[in-house]
Image: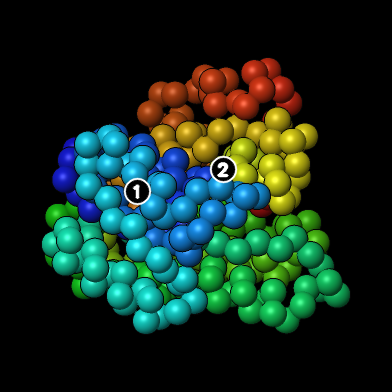
């Protein structure tokens, strides 16, 4: 299925994985909504909604940069309104915005617990709720959420239970929405990287250059997302994919070119 002329709304689309998906889907002809908080550049992270939108438009498609903090329902409603005014609807919603803090119970302040659940869970839910009337009208409706396969092994819950349960909530919503919306022909899937991904957040806030050099580029998630979102109707729905699974289904098993450092030992991501 061609994505030409389709409208893709991406939360957290100003940098990292979100921007990589925006560029990939724009190259396939989709119009892109960059919905994120970043209107001024953070030197640690780089990029704003405006710079990302400019990169999209350089590929010959249309972009909309809109400031959205998905903790604020009014901002979500306004972003959806502006999207529909510019593009006439929404075909694909990518729930990429997320907050992370890998701390144990003692070291997770209530404000950080609330932040993760306000963004990862409540914000994702509200994004789908507000986009839903337009997804129902689309002939190529997809919801794609950046969240992991649900793995209840205690080693993934014990070290950072607050973060883990917030991400598993996102995955459970994917499974619930796939069932709820199947008669509306809205495909609902999640995707998660098999390895860490080299983003500014990983490089500057989480693991430094050492971890970045054991990672893959965000292009692997962008490519996998493209294959999921190119499927018609409900060929894929209710799946909690890893990027490797999606690419393998397309016959792509040589993933060496995604490594930041060719031949480096890769660091496998959380929950896998």
Image spot of residue 176 (x, y percent): 41, 69
Residue 26 is situated, as x and y percent measured from the top left of the image, at 29, 40
Circle 1 crowding by C-alpha within 10 Å: few under 14, some 14–19, many from 20 = many
The label number, if any, that marks residue 193 in the structure image = 2
Q: Position of residue 8 (x, y in %)?
A: 29, 53
Residue at 22% in and 42% down: 61
In front here: 263 or 168? 263
Marker disc for residue 53:
1
Q: Which residue is pictured at 39% across the width and 52% down the height? A: 50
Q: Is residue 197 visible?
A: yes
**The quadrant where residue 111 appears:** bottom right
Residue found at x 36% / y 74%: 76
Would residue 232 be found to the left or right of residue 215 on screen? left
Which colour scheme appears in the figure? rainbow
Disc number for residue 29: none
Lower position in the chain sequence, tag 1 or tag 2? 1
Q: Nearer the viewer, residue 83 or 245?
A: 83
Residue 141, above or below 221:
below
Q: CA distance from mark 1 to mark 2?
A: 24 Å
The answer to whether one can see residue 233 in this image is no
Q: Where is 148 relative to 73, above or below?
A: above
Q: Quadrant of the N terminus?
A: top left
Closer to us: 63 or 185: 63
Residue 52 in the image: above or below residue 129: above
| Residue 203, horizontal then vertical, whole percent | 69, 42
Query: Mark 2: which secondary structure?
Result: loop
Q: Are marks 1 and 2 in contact (CB under 8 Å)?
A: no
Residue 143 is left or right of residue 255, and the answer is: left
Q: Quadrant of residue 42?
A: bottom right
Q: Is residue 202 above or below residue 107?
A: above
């Amino acid at each position: 299925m061609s994505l030409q002329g389709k409208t893709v709304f991406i939360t957290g689309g100003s940098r990292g994985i979100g921007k990589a998906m925006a560029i990939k889907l724009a190259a396939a002809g989709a119009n892109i909504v960059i919905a994120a908080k970043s209107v001024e550049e953070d030197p640690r992270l780089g990029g704003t909604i405006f710079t990302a939108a400019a990169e999209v438009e350089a590929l010959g498609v249309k972009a909309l940069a809109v400031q959205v903090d998905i903790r604020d329902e009014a901002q979500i409603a306004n972003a959806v309104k502006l999207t529909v005014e510019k593009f006439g609807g929404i075909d694909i919603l990518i729930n990429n915005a997320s907050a992370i803090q890998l701390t144990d119970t003692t070291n997770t302040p209530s404000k950080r617990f609330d932040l993760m659940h306000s963004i990862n869970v409540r914000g994702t839910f509200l994004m789908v709720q507000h986009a839903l009337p337009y997804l129902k009208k689309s002939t190529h409706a997809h919801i794609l959420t950046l969240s992991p396969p649900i793995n209840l092994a205690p080693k993934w819950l014990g070290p950072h239970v607050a973060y883990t349960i917030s991400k598993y909530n996102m995955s459970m919503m994917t499974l619930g929405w796939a069932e709820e919306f199947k008669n509306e022909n809205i495909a609902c899937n999640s995707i998660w990287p098999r390895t860490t991904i080299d983003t500014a957040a990983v490089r500057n806030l989480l693991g430094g250059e050492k971890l970045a050099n054991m990672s893959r580029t965000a292009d692997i998630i962008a490519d996998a997302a493209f294959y999921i979102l190119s499927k018609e109707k409900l060929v894929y729905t209710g799946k909690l994919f890893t990027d490797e699974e999606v690419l393998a289904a397309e016959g792509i098993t040589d993933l060496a070119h995604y490594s930041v450092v060719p031949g480096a030992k890769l660091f496998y991501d959380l929950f896998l």
